[in-house]
Image (tube, rainbow, N blue to C red):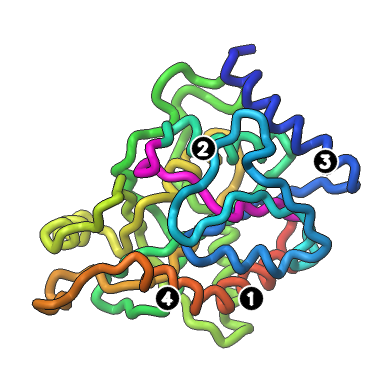
Amino acid sequence: MSQAFDSISASAQYIKDILQGGGLEPKVGIILGSGLGNVAGMIEHPVTVPYSDIPGFPISTAIGHKSNFIIGTLGGRQVIAMQGRFHCYEGYSMDQIVLPVRVMKLLGVTTLMVSNAAGGMNPEFSVGDLMIIRDHINLLPNPLIGRNLDEFGPRFPDMTRPYDPGLIALAKETAAEMGLTLREGVYVSCTGPSYETPAEYKYFRSIGGDAVGMSTTPEVIAARHSGIRVFGMSAITDIAREEDLSDDYVTDGEEIVKAAQAMSENMSALFVGMLAKMEV
């Protein structure tokens, strides 16, 4: 085994020891984006594991992100939720960014639900919309560059269906029962931390993007490499369309987090509804 795998295993073993003490075996992982960490507050009988306690783990420094794993029950399923993720713009390497996903794999997670706050580029989108991520365009470094970790997956993993069609269908069914309207589209990921220029928004739309953000795709690639099925959702927290930007418009990170927090109730309810029906 490689030194990298040994390091990941050490992180996983620390959490596994805690889980075994409480009889927990989560099969579903959840990654909560900017301002969406309140979903973790709905987890029943929570066990909190600070990232700072885990060997080899970084901590999240982004606005609206805490630095904990929350493990417990949500929607009748045992879950492990990341209350705060890691980003390229924080200076973390791709190995560090996808470390939690690989740890989840070693803990037995088979399904990953990811969320983010994103700028809406599709002219039909409005602030407050929830968008199912149907596909993505990754403009971040690929986390699989370098020596392949054979313990997790093949050198050249297939990405034809990065987001599981069955989980997308389940989300639509659950939303319809709730009376909740969902959007669907392609998510574009950039490095940040600067927000995009109007010309960049126009370019991303021209190549097929519907929403843009600074996260998610590395974790999804690592999950698919590891054989974990993925469901992804973007909270549309601001307008990212060149023609809609007024002369005095400024993209405000604090306002984006507030918008995400306002949408967290609907996203939480949807995730809970999906989990209640999900086969894991």
Q: Is residue 230 above or below residue 243?
A: above
Q: Which residue is mark 1?
A: 269
Q: Is residue 190 visible?
A: yes
**Residue located at (39% from left, 43% from top):** 90
- Name the residue carrying label 3: 18
Q: Could you tell me which secondary element the residue under label 1 belongs to?
A: helix
Work out how far the residue at label 2 is from the one at label 1, CA to CA, in angstroms.
Answer: 26 Å
Can residue 280 be seen at all in this image of the molecule? Answer: no
Gap in angstroms between the C-alphas marked 3 and 2: 21 Å
Disc on the earlier residue, 3 or 1: 3
Q: CA distance from mark 1 to mark 4?
A: 17 Å
Whole-angstrom CA distance, mark 3 to mark 1, is 28 Å
Answer left or right for 112 relative to 189. right
Q: Could you say which is closer to the camera, residue 251 or residue 239? A: 251
- The image quarter containing residue 9 is top right
Q: Is residue 163 left or right of residue 236?
A: right
